[in-house]
Image (cartoon, rainbow, N blue to C red):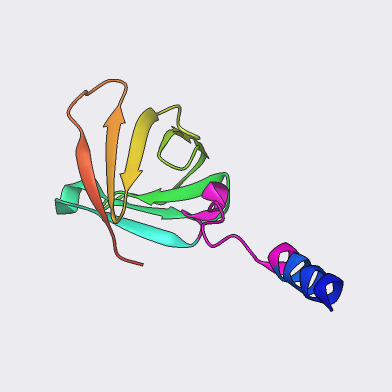
Amino acid sequence: MKYLLTAFIFLALLSCKKDDDPLNNDNILVNTTWEGERVEDGIYTFTSNTEYTFKDPGEPFVDGNYSFDGRQGVLMEETGFTANFGVSGTIMTVTDTINTNPRTYFKIQ
């Protein structure tokens, strides 16, 4: 009986799943849209783990690629524009390499 109880406890411990499994940080931006604090800041939509579109008011959509480690990343538009960005909850901050004034975006979807 003692061995049976020990075996049962051992199997129960093996079957426990860790509650704090790490997030798949590669996917947290996929299918999200971020709107600029000001209308002229535009809208970013992340369409995959590596691709996004950007819509500037009055301009056509621009495609780009990005890399992201779960907190920070780099945006690279097909036009040659490059910017660093960071995400914290529902706020994204984008700082381009020419104008160092960061722009704030809010997750809307």
Question: In terms of depth relative to the viewer, which is nearer, 36 or 72?
Answer: 72
Residue at screen point 27% across, 20% down: 98
* 95 relative position to 77: left or right: left
Counting from the top left corner in percent of width and height, residue 89 is at: 31, 53
- The quadrant holding residue 39 is bottom left
Q: Which region is colored magenta?
A: 13-30
In the image, is residue 36 part of the stretch drawn in magenta?
no
Q: Quadrant of the N terminus?
A: bottom right
Residue occupying the point 84% across, 75% down: 4
Whether residue 80 is situated above or below residue 47 in the rendered picture: above
Q: Main secondary structure of the magenta part?
A: loop
- Nearest the eye: 68 or 98: 68
Residue 31: x and y in percent read 49, 62
Q: Single out the residue that lies furthest toward the front.
A: 2
- Furthest toward the bottom, the residue is 1
Q: Is residue 45 above or below residue 11?
A: above
Q: Within the magenta stretch, is there residue 27?
A: yes
Q: How many marks?
A: 0
Side (left or right) of 64 relative to 59: right
Assign the C terminus to one quadrant of the image. Answer: bottom left
Quadrant of the rendered image containing residue 104: top left
